[in-house]
Amino acid sequence: MSQRWDNLTALVLCRTSPLSNCVPRKSALSIACWPACRSDRLFVCGVALAAARPRFCRNSTGSVAEAAEQRSYSFGIDRFKVEDYAALVETFCGASKKLDFEKIFRFAPKLNGHQLKAACQWLVNFKELSTDTFIEYLRSQRLASNVDLGEVQAVDLTDLKGVDDVLRNLEINIVLPLENDALANQYKLRSKRGVLLYGPPGTGKTTVGRALAHRLKSKFFLIDGTFITGTSDFYNRIHHVFEAAKDNAPSIIFIDDADSIFEDGEERGLYRYLLTMLDGLESESAGRVCVMMTAMNVAHLPPALVRSGRVELWLGMKLPDPQARAEILSEHLQSLPEELRNAEVPRLIAATEGFTGADLKRTVEDGKAIYAYDKAKGVELRPTTEYFMSAVEAVKENKERYAEAEAQAALRPKFPMHGFMRSFISSQVIRGDEDE
Ligand SMILES: Nc1ncnc2c1ncn2[C@@H]1O[C@H](COP(=O)(O)OP(=O)(O)OP(=O)(O)O)[C@@H](O)[C@H]1O
Ligand SMILES: [Mg+2]
């Protein structure tokens, strides 16, 4: 900056949002920022300007009233750059020299002053401040994500059995570019822009979302049935999610049960909006935001949404094969009290052809409940495996009834709330501790 600050008599600040809430109360800058945020982003102040840091400012282009422009110098405050991160952190906790701000900036390029200040206030408690601690803080605090991880069951991608190819693809195309900053930078890795995760109910699609939420933390944004279509702030909420995801790019937007959300054919507005958003992402963030949708029935998704180009990666969740069923059953059985753990897994595997991961979990839970019931009644106990075989039959019956109900529903004219109801119910799933 060539101007001599002490000679200035007036300063016009516009676009002050990056600085909101982050400068000491009494500085000239905060005096200028405070009303500027409220009055059409324009404020003229005639105070000493030494406190205003030149590095935050640049010449403004347009939008400042002509009269004010003639009597003052005017500056717009742009998004922070790497140097600004360093300057602010130095101001807030005086430890900036040890930190790799290039790396922090790559991880979270659009932090505002308020967020940097919050990070510093927390990190000041650490004796040794390191770049990794700083980044871990940004991750753990979920500065931007709209998901409260405390409400999401802690699961790992490796908890899903028999879908190794899907997990490998997720690791390569989403997790690695988002999680491993150094490699992503070295090899210019980009997550896929559009990913569709499809498969029968109960095959682990929402579980993938939960695992990614825990793994990617502040990089993960969720749209699900709690975004109630037809309500007045629906588009607003969607818009905010996309904006936050773009601000925190690289990031992921996970749209759970997209087929249910779009199933109400009436909700044309939503998917048009989504298409616009997706196309916007193509140009604005050059593939730095990944949109992952889950669907039970790909046929219920609007063709324009799935047409080649928008969905770059199709991942099919399949029913577990015998080996995967063995792993899932054994894992669930191991979590039971000792006396129930010795069930004959090979018999159960043979009887559960066509079962999903969710069905197998239910089988083990139901078997345990029947056993506990017999015990409570004081009747003579059967061999353990028999309890789980009874549960298998009950789950099979349920599945048949479900299939019948689905077939009948397909013949009836659509109940307008159907899609919403299903996605609402499933929203209890992703945000709930348990999935049942
Ligand atoms: N392949 C699998 N391995 C282990 N557990 C699984 C597997 N598939 C599903 N499960 C378990 O089944 C339960 C239900 O899974 P989830 O809710 O993720 O299924 P979904 O595909 O989202 O179903 P829906 O289409 O009904 O929403 C979870 O507890 C999950 O861990
Ligand atoms: Mg689901």
Image (cartoon, rainbow, N blue to C red):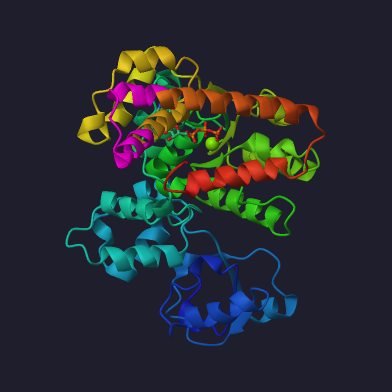
Position of 238 compared to 169: left or right? right
Residue 410: which quarter of the image?
top right
Q: Main secondary structure of the magenta part?
A: helix
Residue 365: which quarter of the image?
top left
The total number of labels drawn is 0
Position of 276 compared to 74: left or right? right
Taking depth in this image into account, of 430 and 66 the one nearest to the observer is 430
What residue is at 46 percent from the left and 51 percent from the top?
A: 109
**Residue 9 in the image: x percent, y percent?**
55, 85
Residue 217 vertical placement versus 258 (above, below): below
Find out whether residue 380 is within the magenta segment: yes
Residue 262 vertical placement versus 195 (above, below): below
**Residue 244 in the image: x percent, y percent?**
55, 53
Taking depth in this image into account, of 243 and 53 the one nearest to the observer is 243
* Residue reaching furthest to the left: 127
For the magenta stretch, what is the residue range? 369-389
What residue is at 35 percent from the left and 62 percent from the top?
A: 119
What residue is at 39 percent from the left and 28 percent from the top?
A: 160
Taking depth in this image into account, of 393 and 236 the one nearest to the observer is 393
Residue 172 seen in the current view? no
What residue is at 47 percent from the left and 86 percent from the top?
A: 48
Position of 307 compared to 132: left or right? right
**Residue 399 in the image: x percent, y percent?**
56, 26
Taking depth in this image into account, of 81 and 241 the one nearest to the observer is 241
Residue 131 seen in the current view? yes
Find out whether residue 206 is within the magenta segment: no
**Residue 382 in the image: x percent, y percent?**
30, 25
